Image (cartoon, rainbow, N blue to C red):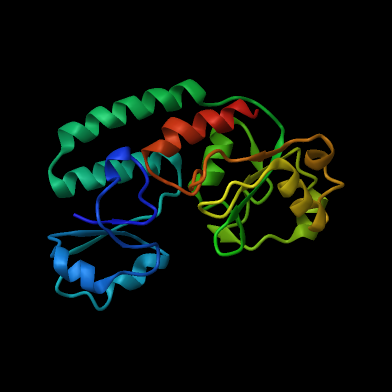
Amino acid sequence: MGVSSFCKRPPETKGIPVVGNYSHIKMDLLKDLKPDLIFTITGYQRKFLEGYSPYLIFPLPLPLSVYGIIDLIHSVSLVIQRQDKAIEIEKGLLKILEKYCCKQTKKKVYVELTLGGPVAFGAFSYITNALNFVGFQNIYGNEPLSWITPDYQYVREQDPDIIIYEHLWGKEPGQEEVRELFAKRGLDGTKAYKGNAIFITPGKYDFLAHHGPSFITDAIPWLSSLT
């Protein structure tokens, strides 16, 4: 068994050999492990479907919604024949979603993640769907894209009530450091900046960028607490 360097959840992943990261594979280690099956995500990782013919590769779709995350769990269970365990997990996640669904708010939100550079999210993203789910309006929510390079002039014009920032993986910047970052980007005149409504996602590792079950158990309640 092997994992990527981003596989920090659940805790049981600790100690499992790290075969690669989101975009690169240690081929020598992969050959040593001789995996029966490799799971990848579509999108950027689509290239892994080419050139690895000795291995059985199962691509999973990048989820477009919070329900797509649950569907990922079920898809994996069908491949490894653990539907019984998947249904148990799915029921628990659906209960959480029911608890936090459908708050009403007119607050506009700008979300920025650091993924090799600043990235925002459009309509084709589970992050936008999650914001809508708990009652927010993503300022890029009508763009027919998954990932967007933010236009800070546009962000200023939209004047978000809240800014959510996810830092570079493995880093933990302080509040003043992040405020300085957005001031340099010309967002110090926004409602979010002036109202001290800039929120940094918790922890050192990916939080909103992680589209596993913890997005529902951890990220959805956290987002809901900001409404």
Where residue 111 appears, as percent x and y from the top left, is 64, 47
* 149 vs 207: above or below: below
Q: Which residue of the protein is positioned furthest toward the front in this rendering?
A: 15
Where residue 151 appears, as percent x and y from the top left, is 73, 61
> Which is nearer the eye, 14 or 111?
14
Q: Which quadrant is the C terminus positioned in? A: top right
Quadrant of the rendered image containing residue 214: top left
Q: Which residue of the protein is positioned furthest toward the right in this rendering?
A: 189
* 208 vs 27: above or below: above
Where residue 171 appears, as percent x and y from the top left, is 56, 51
* 174 vs 53: above or below: above
Where residue 170 appears, as percent x and y from the top left, is 51, 52
Residue at the spot 54% in from the left edge and 34% down from the top edge? 133
Q: Which quadrant is the N terminus positioned in? A: bottom left
Residue at the spot 75% in from the left edge and 54% down from the top edge? 181
Quadrant of the rendered image containing residue 5: bottom left
Horizontal relation, residue 150 to residue 57: left or right = right
Horizontal relation, residue 137 to residue 203: left or right = right
Horizontal relation, residue 184 to residue 59: left or right = right
Q: Is residue 145 visible?
A: no
Q: Is residue 13 visible?
A: yes
Quadrant of the rendered image containing residue 18: bottom left
Question: How many circles with numbers are drawn on the protein?
Answer: 0
* 164 vs 148: above or below: above
Residue at the spot 74% in from the left edge and 36% down from the top edge? 197
Horizontal relation, residue 26 to residue 110: left or right = left
> Which is nearer the eye, 21 or 60?
21
Residue at the spot 30% in from the left edge and 45% down from the top edge? 14
> Which is nearer the eye, 211 or 35?
35
